[in-house]
Image (cartoon, helix red, strand yellow):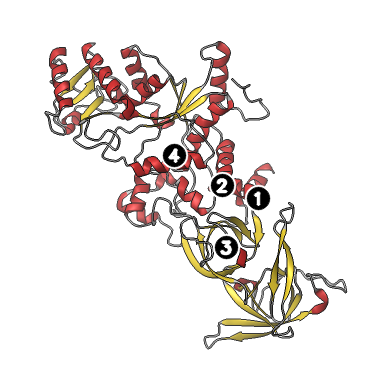
């Protein structure tokens, strides 16, 4: 086992403290965790926090982490979800090293455990309907009511349970329930259901089973079977821990300990699987990997890096109480990562033609552009011609004070090229500016004046002759409401949507970006970070770039204010 991380290497949190104490006391001599998703949807960034915690703790302490699919509900589970989960975990940088397990691997063993509970008088077959069971469960202030079938004999219960397995009964005719206490203060402990009949083929076991174990029953026993030392769950499972412990103690099997940590909540972001499914089914988004979705595949397609997600998970830490994290912090982690690795490229999102009237019509020069201003990433040459594209918002006919970009009679620098001065404005019949005409100063080649004069405005540009037309997708929050707890599902969900979450503009990029591979990340100078869409972008064809994040770092501003 490797040495545990030092205090200075990793921020302390209660999970690390628990593991340290368990290893120091000899309770465990190793660390064995698991990431146990249900394959009933795509993983989201909340799952990413759990992935980083479970795989991260195992990695730090030289232990193991299993990837286990809790596949106990064949009505909602699909192979597509299994494959997407494995791809997401790998993309985040983790490997389960062959320890890929499924709750369905244990169906026979789980069934035998259930028979043992019956034999011990700790489980019984209930023939009430789901509605009757629910009605008799009681409330937080009133005890539940015993089932009329609660005192069936062991022999009768075993007979009925075996016949349930044999397929003699229809869906909902019987369930197997734990025999605990219908007056228990924890409602979950009021004879919870352990098995239900479901005549549905399973994505792995086919038609071999028509009864399926419930999640709470399966989860703890899967942990036990796999020898998990630290079962890490989010806070919504805190009340379930009592049932987790009861099942393991009732059977007398190896007993891992469950620890709960706060789930991830981010402003403007819904992480409820029910709501995410609704967004897909209602056609609000194109798919699970729509770049506006908080799914791991969605944020990957938008251009986020696995390193930025892992950094984000480390920074927010592991707490015992739920809190709301600013989305700006996630973007801050992304910008910090991309700032060092993303090449600086030229992209014009809303083009306006700039014509240099005193430049030769067939003139052409090539200027050297570094890929990064601070790191040695090399350089490339871009062509300069008489007709250029600039950003439309870099020109104003009647500019306000402190507008340092282009305006009639005003001089600006074209990055790495020349100084130009606006001499004429060309408009269409409606009065919209269609073209600006300028004159250049040939004594400012490279963007510096021989006479030492300086200008405050510097514009990025592209040669109209060589630039490649591109589809540029600009994303904003999908959810207008900052507090996700206020976002309702159902018909009300649509009232929380941002109608401007996606804007598609037709712009231009430099030729190299059209030839780049999907998922190529770069910074469009002065415009933000962008990524070649992993589904729509095809090298050599019309490029499609997604805006990953703007350049303005609101979190850095917030953090600076908090220090004052």
Instruction: Provide residue 210's location: percent of width, then percent of height.
Output: 20, 31
Q: Where is residue 84 drawn, in percent x and y?
A: 41, 43
Check if mark 2's residue and mark 4's residue have beta carbons within 8 Å.
no
Q: Secondary structure at mark 2?
A: loop
Judging by the rendered image, the residue that carries numbered circle 3 is 515
Which residue position holds label 4? 86
State the separation of the CA atoms marked 2 and 4: 17 Å
With respect to residue 439, does 36 lie above or below?
above
Q: Nearer the viewer, mark 2 or mark 4?
A: 4
Which circle's residue, 2 or 4, is located before the other in the chain?
Answer: 4
Does 380 appear above or below 100? below
* Quadrant holding the C terminus: top right
Q: Estimate the spatial distance between the alpha carbons at disc 3 and disc 2, rounded to whole Å.
A: 21 Å
Q: Residue furthest bottom?
A: 429
Q: Tell me the CA gap for discs 3 and 1.
A: 19 Å
Which residue is denoted by mark 2 in the rendering? Answer: 305
Q: Is residue 211 visible?
A: yes
Q: Which mark is residue 341?
A: 1
State which quarter of the image contains the N terminus. top right
The residues bearing labels 1 and 4 have C-alpha atoms spaced at a distance of: 26 Å
Q: Could you tell me which secondary element the residue under label 3 belongs to?
A: helix
Considering only order in the chain, which callout, 2 or 3, is on the residue closer to the N terminus? 2
The mark nearer the N terminus, 1 or 4, is 4
Disc 2 crowd, CA 10 A, few/some/many (<14, 14-19, 20+)? many
**Whole-Å distance between the Cαs marked 1 and 2?**
11 Å
């Amino acid at each position: 086992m490797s040495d545990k991380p030092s205090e200075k290497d990793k921020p302390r949190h209660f999970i690390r403290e628990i593991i340290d104490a368990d290893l120091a006391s000899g309770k465990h001599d190793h660390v064995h965790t698991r990431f146990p998703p249900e394959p009933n949807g795509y993983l989201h960034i909340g799952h990413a926090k759990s992935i980083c915690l479970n795989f991260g703790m195992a990695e730090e302490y030289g232990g193991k982490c299993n990837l286990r699919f809790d596949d106990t509900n064949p009505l909602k589970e699909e192979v597509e979800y299994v494959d997407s989960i494995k791809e997401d975990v790998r993309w985040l940088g983790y490997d389960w090293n062959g320890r890929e397990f499924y709750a369905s691997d244990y169906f026979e063993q789980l069934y035998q455990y259930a028979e043992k509970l019956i034999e011990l008088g700790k489980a019984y077959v209930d023939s009430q309907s789901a509605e009757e069971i629910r009605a008799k469960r009681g409330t937080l202030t009133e005890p539940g009511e015993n089932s009329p079938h609660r005192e069936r004999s062991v022999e009768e219960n075993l007979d009925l349970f075996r016949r349930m397995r044999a397929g003699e009964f229809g869906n909902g005719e019987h369930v197997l329930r734990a025999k605990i206490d219908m007056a228990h203060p924890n409602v979950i402990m009021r004879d919870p259901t352990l098995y239900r009949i479901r005549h549905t083929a399973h994505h792995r076991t086919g038609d071999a089973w028509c009864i399926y174990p419930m999640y709470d029953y399966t989860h703890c026993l899967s942990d036990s079977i796999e020898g998990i030392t630290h079962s890490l769950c989010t806070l919504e499972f805190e009340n379930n821990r009592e049932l987790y412990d009861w099942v393991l103690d009732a059977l007398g099997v190896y007993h891992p300990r469950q620890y709960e940590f706060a789930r991830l909540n981010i402003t403007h972001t819904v992480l409820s699987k029910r709501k995410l499914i609704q967004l897909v089914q209602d056609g609000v988004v194109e798919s699970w990997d729509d770049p506006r979705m908080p799914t791991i595949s969605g944020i990957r397609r938008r251009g986020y890096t696995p390193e930025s997600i892992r950094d984000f998970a480390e920074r927010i830490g592991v707490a015992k109480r739920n809190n709301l994290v600013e989305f700006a912090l996630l973007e801050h982690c992304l910008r910090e990562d991309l700032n060092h690795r993303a090449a600086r490229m030229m992209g014009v999102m809303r083009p306006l033609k700039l014509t240099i009237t005193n430049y030769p019509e067939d003139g052409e020069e090539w200027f050297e552009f570094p890929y990064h201003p601070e790191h040695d990433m090399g350089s490339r040459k871009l062509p300069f011609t008489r007709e250029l594209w600039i950003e439309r918002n870099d020109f104003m006919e009647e500019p306000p004070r402190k507008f340092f970009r282009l305006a009639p009679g005003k001089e600006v620098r074209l990055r790495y090229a020349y100084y130009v001065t606006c001499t004429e404005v060309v408009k269409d019949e409606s009065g919209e500016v269609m073209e600006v005409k300028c004159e250049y100063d040939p004594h400012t080649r490279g963007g510096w004046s021989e006479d030492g004069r300086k200008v405050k405005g510097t514009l990025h540009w592209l040669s109209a002759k060589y630039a490649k037309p591109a589809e540029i997708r600009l994303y904003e929050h999908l959810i207008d409401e900052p507090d996700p707890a206020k976002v309702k599902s159902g018909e009300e969900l649509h009232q929380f949507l941002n109608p401007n979450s996606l804007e598609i503009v037709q712009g231009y990029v430099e030729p190299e970006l059209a030839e780049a591979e999907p998922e190529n990340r770069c910074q469009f100078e002065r415009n933000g970070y962008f990524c070649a869409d992993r589904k729509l972008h095809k090298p050599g064809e019309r490029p499609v770039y997604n805006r990953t994040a703007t350049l303005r770092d609101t979190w850095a501003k917030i953090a600076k204010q908090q220090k004052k």
